[in-house]
């Protein structure tokens, strides 16, 4: 005869189990800042190259600048969205 059990099971990562947790979070925050600063700097340089290439009729330089703008925007979006995605997945975990 089966017994119905109504145990509420919650699963959540135990961040306190990792030694040096504060140091890891500090390093990850610093890396995220470096990536975002590098993406903004490359965006500025690429936009300047795109403008110079378009203004002087140098289509190769304009195309290189355009590709650089798109790549730097993509890198900034991925770096920023990575934090939101991980927080979403951590919040989603206990509901599964």
Image (cartoon, rainbow, N blue to C red):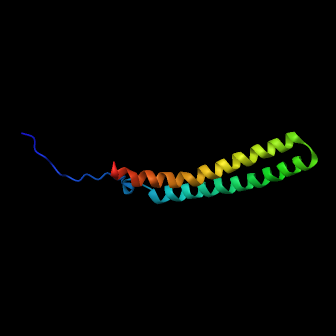
Report which quarter residue 34 is drawn in.
bottom right
Q: Is residue 65 left or right of residue 92?
A: right
x, y percent for residue 38: 70, 53
Foreground residue, 92 or 28?
92
x, y percent for residue 6: 17, 51
x, y percent for residue 3: 10, 44
Q: Residue at x 50, y 57 (%)?
A: 25
Q: Is residue 72 left or right of residue 6?
A: right
Q: Is residue 27 left or right of residue 74?
A: left
Foreground residue, 63 or 24?
63
Q: Is 40 placed above or below 71 here?
A: below
Q: Is residue 1 left or right of residue 66?
A: left
Foreground residue, 26 or 53?
53
Q: Residue at x 88, y 47 (%)?
A: 54
x, y percent for residue 70: 71, 46
Name the quarter where the N terminus is drawn: top left
Residue with the most extreme left position = 1
Q: Residue at x 86, y 43 (%)?
A: 61
Count the marks: how many?
A: 0
């Amino acid at each position: 005869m089966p017994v119905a059990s109504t145990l509420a099971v919650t699963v959540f990562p135990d961040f306190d189990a990792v030694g040096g947790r504060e140091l890891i979070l500090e390093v990850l925050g610093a890396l995220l800042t470096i990536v975002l600063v590098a993406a903004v700097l490359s965006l500025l340089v690429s936009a300047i190259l795109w403008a110079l290439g378009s203004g002087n009729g140098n289509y190769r330089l304009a195309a290189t600048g355009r590709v650089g703008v798109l790549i730097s925007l993509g890198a900034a979006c991925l770096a920023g969205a990575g934090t939101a995605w991980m927080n979403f997945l951590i919040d989603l975990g206990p509901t599964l």
